Amino acid sequence: MIYSRNRRLRVNESMRGLVRECSLSTDDFVMPIFVMEGENKEEAISSMPGIFRRSIDLTIKECKELFSLGVKAVNLYMKVSEHLKDNTGKEAWNKDGLMQNTIKAIKDAIPEMVIMPDVALDPYSIYGHDGIIENGKILNDATNEALARMSVSHAEAGADIVAPSDMMDGRVLAIREALEESGFHDVGILSYAAKYASSFYGPFRSALDSAPKDNMEIPKDKKTYQMDFHNSREALNEVFKDVEEGADIIMIKPGLPYLDIVSKVREAIDLPIAVYNVSGEYAMLKAAAKNGWLDNDKAIIESLTCFKRAGADMIFTYAAKEAAMILNG
């Protein structure tokens, strides 16, 4: 005789919902947005079906639609013109730059939208690296000074949270001090604390033309500053340092191949945790769905729910708009 039957709590959807351990909502999503120069311009990103680079005016239109669907946070990336790139990244803190004008425009149009601009030098670098290069090496401390200036510039434009994704040592402290000294006490820092040197970033780098350039005099990849994907204890070390330096939210990137890291960090800290469902993950799902190998809508919701189950509080995902439409019925 069987007295304990787990299937009693799976008998129908109402029962399954009653005992469900986590749930997914539009409040969980942050939509990455790619912005380009010009007016009334839109360019499809071939490796990321359904994702576009847009001029500021069309970006505003897209943000309004996202907000109406319940997606209330965006993560901004700029497609920087080649003539503005150098080895200092100085265009990154131009008060009249594309990023700064985009932040201002979104805030003016949708004051309650949470704006999280990306803080990294690779879109502005002639080398495609996240840091300033000297004698073939990525300079850590000089890069931190540039990132701090960039962050203050974003705050001046109206950013709610700055999101350093560079993985330089000590940059959270440098940014926090710069924000405090400039009077931006309420601007938060979402730190990419455990960002791995991953092969899953390919479509993103093509979208911004921000991959490391093929130059024998500089590192060919980002492995000297992004984390080794073989390691997990190291992730906790990185997270604890960023928490001590003043991070408000901790990011783990990539997402699906690193759910074990999300879970470990969740057990270790009480701060909010973000996870990035990166471009390669998105592109794989879209390719499989196009070939009829996966149900697109079901796979999106299942994969995003996995992040919540692992312990994430928010999800950066290119599927945010699509998922919101699915959840809204």
Image: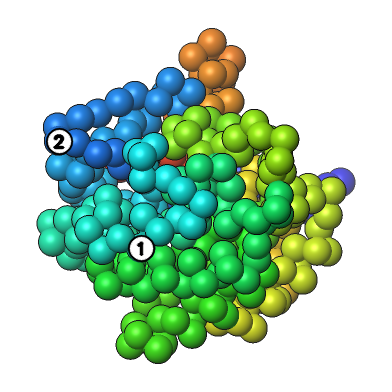
In the picture, the quarter occupied by the C terminus is top left
Residue, x 30% and y 42% (percent of image)?
Answer: 35
- Residue 211 visible, this orientation: yes
- Which numbered marker is on residue 150? none
* Residue 294, x across and y down, in percent: 56, 20
Look at the picture and state if 232 lies above or below 36: below
The reply to whether dot 2 and dot 1 touch (C-beta < 8 Å) is no
Give the quadrant of residue 180.
bottom left
- Secondary-structure class at tag 2: loop
Q: In the image, residue 93 lies at what x, y percent?
A: 35, 63
Which class describes the residues within 10 Å of circle 1: few (<14), some (14-19), or many (20+)? many
Give the label on residue 39, or none. 2
Secondary element type, mark 1: helix
- Give, as a three-letter code, the residue at label 1: Trp
Q: Nearer the viewer, residue 214 or 74?
A: 214
Indicate how the structure is coloured in the image.
Answer: rainbow
Relative depth, front residue between 180 and 254:
180
